[in-house]
Amino acid sequence: MSKRSDSEADPLRSPVFELPDTVAEPVVVVDDDAAVLKSLQASLTRAGYDTRCFSSPVEALASIRQRPPKVMVTDHDMPGMTGIQLAEQALEIYPEMKVLLVTGAGDEDTATRALRMGFLDYLTKPFDLADLHRAVQKALLAHASDEYAVEMDRWLRDEVHRQTSLVHEVTIGTIESLLAALEARSPYFRGHSQSVAVSAAGIARELGLDEDVVKEIRTAGLLHDVGMIAVPDEVVNKPSDLSREEYALIKQHCAKGAEILTPMAHLGETITYVLEHHERFDGSGYPAGKKGSAISLGGQIVGLAETWTALTEKRAYRDGLAPMEAMATLSGAVGAWYSRELVEALRSSEM
């Protein structure tokens, strides 16, 4: 049995395995010739293998069901069941088993057929016992290699899952920190991003988007205004109308947000959606003045969700609009700021 070393002590290390010793490795031998069977059993047992010998393929199958061997050596020409037929049934019981087929002299067609079926190797009678030992050792090495591959695959899957979980934890923690910093800037931001995220996810689901895409859009809703951190406090909290220069600073928050998030490559398309959430269908938006389908669908959705939230949430200087009033306002922007499909998806998800 292959063994792992102390890789669990350091989960970033790949596992280390030891190849099996020959002592007590299980080998099944099947041959209807009693003399041949006795000779093979004696030789393999002396070599240290846990050798189980059978003259009957049926009895061999019963033994394999109870205790599968790593290697089976079987004669091909046997009454009632050929070696290939035996191997086919045995491999259904234990697919990891390695099979060595013993054929008669001149029976190359059977040997070739066996190799094409996935048998490890074949021996042609008469053969030296040294050749048998080498073939068995090769089979055990192949079995150990397969075990290693399975263990390595399992370890890699576990490691990928562990690293993904760590990235997720870092992402959530970073998002929470960014939101906390943003909400501390102004009462306007408190709860705003969460509301945009919920509405954006609702629109995305109404459109039938894949749940992974919905998650990216929801995250973009949470982070859409993170670039406002780079805007001076006196501009963010200014009670009167903004000057042209101050409004230009506000418009930079989309690009600033994408810049802040770019190191978090695992956020995927979320960064694009943050960058484009103020683009408008008719090209009147910013930062690039993109039009129609040139704007990412996620960017369009987050932008619509933000406008909906801004219309319906209460501000210091006004009450929020009732849903019907807000929807009427948005309907007037169809074809200019937003597509009809998105506005209808918002209507279905919110009303």
Image: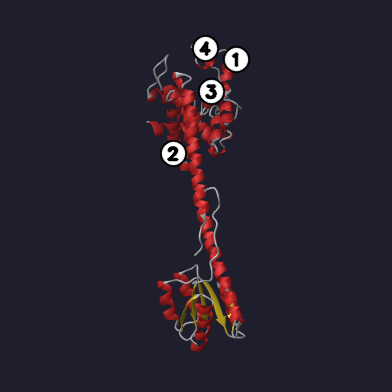
Q: CA distance from mark 1 to mark 2?
A: 38 Å
Q: Nearer the viewer, mark 1 or mark 2?
A: 1
Tell me which numbered mark, 3 or 4, is placed earlier along the sequence.
Answer: 3
How many neighbours does mark 3 have within 10 angstroms: few (below 14), some (14-19), or many (20 or more)?
many
User: Which quadrant of the view contains residue 247?
Assistant: top right
| Labelled disc at residue 241 | 4
> Callout 1, which amino acid?
Glu
Which residue occupies the foreground of this view, 207 or 175? 175
Q: CA distance from mark 3 to mark 1?
A: 17 Å
Give SS at disc 3. Answer: helix
| Labelled disc at residue 205 | 2
How many neighbours does mark 4 have within 10 angstroms: few (below 14), some (14-19), or many (20 or more)?
few
Q: Nearer the viewer, mark 3 or mark 4?
A: 3
Which residue occupies the foreground of this view, 121 or 128? 128
Tell me which numbered mark, 1 or 2, is placed earlier along the sequence.
Answer: 2
Give SS at disc 4. Answer: loop
Residue 191 image offset from top left, x and y in percent = 42, 25
Q: Residue at x 58, y 34 (%)?
A: 263
Tell me which numbered mark, 3 or 1, is placed earlier along the sequence.
Answer: 3
User: Which quadrant of the view contains residue 104?
Assistant: bottom right
Residue under circle 1? 245
Residue 196 image offset from top left, x and y in percent = 45, 29
> Callout 2, which amino acid?
Arg
Tell me which numbered mark, 2 or 4, is placed earlier along the sequence.
Answer: 2
How many neighbours does mark 1 have within 10 angstroms: few (below 14), some (14-19), or many (20 or more)?
few
